[in-house]
Amino acid sequence: MTIFRKLFTCALAFGGLVGAFPLTRRQGGQLSDIDILKFALTLEHLESAFYREGFAKFSASDFEALGLDQATIEGLISIGKTEETHVKFLTEAIKASKGVPVEPCIYDFKLTTAASMVQTARILEAVGISAYLGAAPLVKDKAVLSAAASIVTVEARHQTFIRTALKSKPVPQAFDVAIGPLQIFTLASSFIVSCPKVSDLGLTPLPPLNVLDASNVRPGSSLKMVMPNAKDGLSCSFTTGDGGLQFSPFSNGACVVPDGIGGETFLTVTTEKEGAGTLADDKIVAGPAVLVLS
């Protein structure tokens, strides 16, 4: 996840960074390569802290109680150690580019059990892959892209490893999905309580989207959600690798999950309608949230 974090044009499930980064919303397309490096480091700090705090909070016996063997537990620990290495690498890369590295923030990962930690790790890794793909077109330095291409496979291995540990489908889709910078940044924001001034990225996340009963999501089910400024006449957008971009009418605080989606699915509420080929940031009313379907 090292250099490929240069593709991480935003940080890693929902909306609380307004207080941490109280600046105006800015589109991802305005980001320079040094901005992308800073986003990458922001995410590496977050992920490194996530694994470090999780393994400090829960013992090996907590993970064994989930049915994980020692090799799997050691594999999860090794993922966290790679995040620490990535932090060091990106810090030096930013300094070499005459930039000022961002510093760690204060986080709240809301980890109550070892099971919640592994489930959250699954989502963090999935979001990371989509972030890289979404940011790739914004990177100008071809050397960065080349290095990133060698790292994205490692990101995918992380997620597959975690999915396997959870006894989920190792590869739920034939394609991964690219998600734009501002949406990814919004997803990261619920984990961040506050940040030092040097870590101000100049972005304001989109309004949060809270999906109720998110553990029982399947095609055809009705999703109830809570969001600011909810009203009828909007749409829910569902973005996946295989299914692409699909829409469902939003009415009475709910929408129906369409067919043809699976894996980690990115949900927003938007003013866009069926037939829109892309999902513009300025059309998003709330979200994204990440749904786990398989």
Image (cartoon, rainbow, N blue to C red):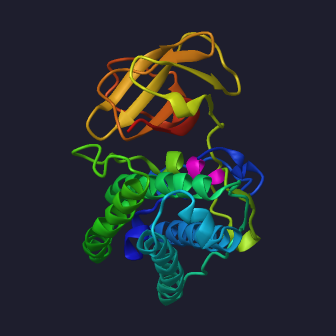
Q: Quadrant of the N terminus?
A: bottom left
Q: Is residue 248 visible?
A: yes
User: Residue 187 colored magenta?
Assistant: yes
Most foreground residue, 29 or 252: 252
Give coordinates of residue 173: x percent, y percent.
26, 43
Question: Does the magenta portion include 32?
Answer: no
Which one is nearer the viewer's eye here, 156 or 270? 156
Q: Quadrant of residue 193?
A: bottom right
Q: Main secondary structure of the magenta part?
A: helix
Name the one closer to the observer, 41 or 174. Answer: 174
Q: Position of residue 185 (x, y in %)?
A: 56, 52
Residue 222 pos. (x, y %): 51, 17
Image quadrant of residue 105? bottom right
Q: Is residue 172 above or below residue 114?
A: above
When the figure is inspected, residue 53 is found, relative to residue 67, above or below; the finding is: below
Q: Is residue 243 left or right of residue 130?
A: left
| Residue at screen point 71% across, 27% down | 228
7 vs 234, left or right, is left
**In the picture, which quadrant includes the C terminus?**
top left
110 relative position to 247: left or right: right
Residue at image coords 45%, 68% = 69
x, y percent for residue 134: 37, 52
In this orientation, does residue 139 appear? no
> What segment is highlighted magenta in the picture?
185-189
Name which residue lies at 32% across and 19% down.
275
| Residue 198 quadrant | bottom right
